[in-house]
Amino acid sequence: MKVLAADGISPKGIELLQKEFEVDVKDKISAEELLEIIPAYDALMVRSASKVTAEVIERAKNLKIIGRAGVGVDNIDIPAATAKGIIVINSPGGNTIAATEHTMAMMLAMSRNIPVANETMQKGEWNRKKYVGVELRGKTLGVIGMGRIGAGVAKRAMAFDMKVIAYDPYINEERAKALGVTIGTFEDVITQSDFITVHMPLTPDTKGMIGMEQMKKMKQGVRLVNCARGGIIVEEDLAEAVKQGIVAGAAIDVYTSEPVGADHPLVGVPGIVLTPHLGASTVEAQIGVSLDVSEGILAALKGEPVATA
Ligand code: MLT
């Protein structure tokens, strides 16, 4: 059996697979190369860079399983894989803490102007008056999506004395009570929050769920965070809303199309803090997701049952 590990998967999981199978590691692989070599493999491991399209799946003559070393499976054509009997697995919890902590880091960095203060200080400037920030204490955080990451962010925000209002179509009163958050409608969250953070997968329902229309309804001075998926917040609208002062600031880790270059609408807008999809990029999370999917691939290739994504 042959396994292809693409996109820079942590060696921990690869070592596990190498005990049983032949593993080819290709940290950077183009769409063309993936199409060309995929027929040789029984299993494929990816992060978010490789797009496992219907065409890739069509060409995959021996493929039995696709492992996504992360949570989001939006880069994999699951209906096409299912139609061909190919199992798709992911790591639902492996990078929860990393994404949760990155969200907090982004919220704090944005509130206290840390990136721009650092950038100017590195150039020899001393700007104490220019970079006056805002506190989290006493503010309302709107959490859109109360899965593992949303709940983790809510818990940490409460440790900062924030009040949390959450919107999630699947949360019930009992769980909200246990988490110490108030449940609201989407409208409640967008109109009552000082900070809003999204933690939903990208689906036809969530794509573009926050655009100019919603931003205009938000509180004066609202700040937005997206460490979930690009496209949930409309990028052009966000750039415009920050420029016009409708939104006071934003912290964004994910983009509609990645990687992003200097021509992206969010690049260069004062008040917007950007990171290049680093939510899951911790040593611990990368080991966790790599081990999760490798164990799944190992089991599936031995004919044992596995939990699908
Ligand atoms: C995920 O879906 O798990 C994250 O976006 C992280 C990643 O792509 O590696």
Image: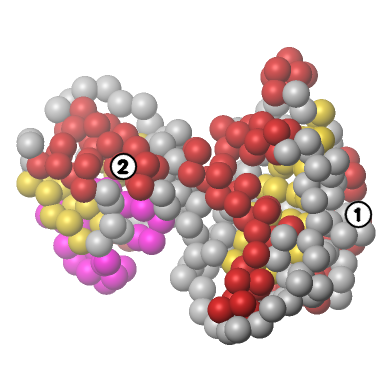
Q: In the image, which disc is placed on residue 206?
A: none
Element marked by disc 1: loop
Q: CA distance from mark 1 to mark 2?
A: 40 Å
Question: Which stretch is magenta?
Answer: 28-50
Q: Amino acid at mark 1?
A: Lys
> Is 236 situated above or below 198?
below
Q: Earlier in the sequence, mark 1 or mark 2?
A: 1
- In the rendered image, which quarter is residue 109 located in? bottom right
Q: Where is mark 1, residue-wise?
A: 219
Q: Is residue 106 left or right of residue 5?
A: right
Mark 2 surroundings within 10 Å by alpha-carbon count, few (fewer than 14), some (14 through 19), many (20 or more): some
Residue 42 in magenta stretch:
yes
- In the rendered image, which quarter is residue 37 located in? bottom left
Q: Is residue 227 visible?
A: yes
Q: Where is mark 2, residue-wise?
A: 287
Taking the spot 86% from the left edge, 75% from the top edge, the residue there is: 244
> Is 142 situated above or below 226?
above
- Residues under numbered marks 1 and 2 in contact, where contact means CB atoms less than 8 Å apart: no
Where is residue 52 shown, x and y percent of the image? Answer: 35, 56
Q: Is residue 150 visible?
A: no
> Is 43 situated above or below 121?
above
Taking the spot 21% from the left edge, 28% from the top edge, the residue there is: 299
Where is residue 17 shown, x and y percent of the image? Answer: 15, 39
Q: Is residue 172 left or right of residue 106?
A: right
Where is residue 114 shown, x and y percent of the image? Answer: 65, 64
Q: How is the image coloured?
A: secondary structure
Element marked by disc 2: helix
In the depicted view, which residue is nearer to us: 29 or 221?
221
